[in-house]
Image: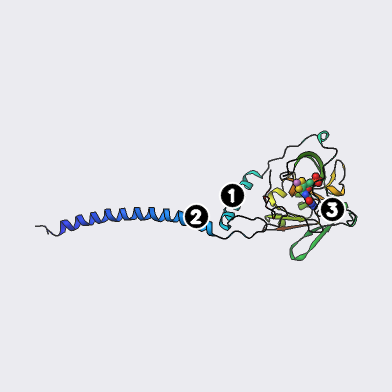
Amino acid sequence: MSNPDKEPKKELTVQQKINRRNFISFTSFAVLAGGAFEGWRWLYKSPEETAGITAGARKPLRRALNKTELFFKRVFSDNHLVKTYPKSMAAKHVRVNSDIGVEQVKKFDPATWKLQVNKKGGEVLQITLQELMTLPKTEIVYDFKCVEGWDQISHWAGVKFSDFIKHYQLEDYAKMEFVGMETPDKTYFVGLDMPSAMHPQTLLAYEMNDRLLPLQNGAPLRLIIPVKYGIKNLKRIGTISFSNTRPKDYWAQRGYDYYSGL
Ligand SMILES: Nc1nc2c(c(=O)[nH]1)N[C@H]1C(S)=C(S)[C@@H](COP(=O)(O)O)O[C@H]1N2
Ligand SMILES: [Mo]
């Protein structure tokens, strides 16, 4: 004879199981929904990033944006070449746009200028223009684009940044994430992601239209980085440095996109 107490007890256990499952699914749903809401509130309430290189986004959002940016950089930066044109299409009168750090034409003496490359341990490599001109020369004719809405096909020549890295045995530095460049007076400065700096069309340019650069266009040496908008094409390079953190960038500090790629 079976124990009469056992049957109802077993049924209760089944009922309990059902109850427990209901409880689990409802609470999980509530927890997830609550989590989503809390996540949104957390993002909404979290502090804004420190204004500097970039500004205006919540800190966690900026972290996510940086990740996304990195993803697209990896997908698009490698080996895509900017369209080039025949020399005959290059503008004879090249625009002179903005002149921060290059305005003092009289005070600046291109003859005594040397490119400074900051190395580890405070060591500074000093390179003259004459020395740079002994390296292989690369030319490019491409459509230079300014964020202000103009573009112009222009002709430049100089040393490929990647050739420069090889020649001065800076390969270890090129393994870092960023390059920073500034004018000798440090009033204009740009930060570049390494893949764009090492892009085969990026030049340390000293010529425009087959002549040495005019001062207003960046003599003695300027950056020509066709994968970026004009703002990144620093005129009159004073110093080059390497880092794994974003170097300061003049226009990014003023709200423009740090990457500023085309
Ligand atoms: N030192 C320095 N480099 C600079 C700038 C500047 O103000 N100072 N302006 C940038 C911008 S916004 C553009 S569009 C190009 C213009 O180059 P260009 O004067 O040779 O046409 O230089 C870039 N490099
Ligand atoms: Mo520009």
At 80% from the left edge and 62% from the top edge, which residue is drawn? 124
Where's residue 196, x and y in %?
70, 48
Nearest to N terminus: mark 2 or mark 1: 2
Identify the image quadrant of the N terminus.
bottom left
Residue 68's disc is 1
Frontmost residue, 200 versus 24: 24
Frontmost residue, 146 versus 139: 146
Where's residue 70, x and y in %?
62, 50
Secondary structure state at the residue bearing disc 3: loop
Is 161 displayed left or right of 131 in the figure? left
Is 259 displayed left or right of 166 in the figure? left
Residue type indicated by callout 2:
Trp
Residue that mark 2 sits on: 40
Residue type indicated by callout 1:
Thr
Nearest to N terminus: mark 3 or mark 2: 2
Residue type indicated by callout 3:
Glu
Q: CA distance from mark 1 to mark 3?
A: 37 Å
Where's residue 128, x and y in %?
86, 55
Foreground mark, 1 or 3?
3
Frontmost residue, 160 versus 57: 57
Q: CA distance from mark 3 to mark 2?
A: 47 Å
Q: CA distance from mark 2 to mark 1?
A: 19 Å
Residue that mark 3 sits on: 103
Give yes or no for contact between labels 3 and 2 (Cβ–Cβ under 8 Å): no
Where's residue 90, x and y in %?
82, 36
The crowding category of the residue bearing disc 2, from other C-alpha atoms within 10 Å (few below 14, some 14 to 19, many at least 20), is few
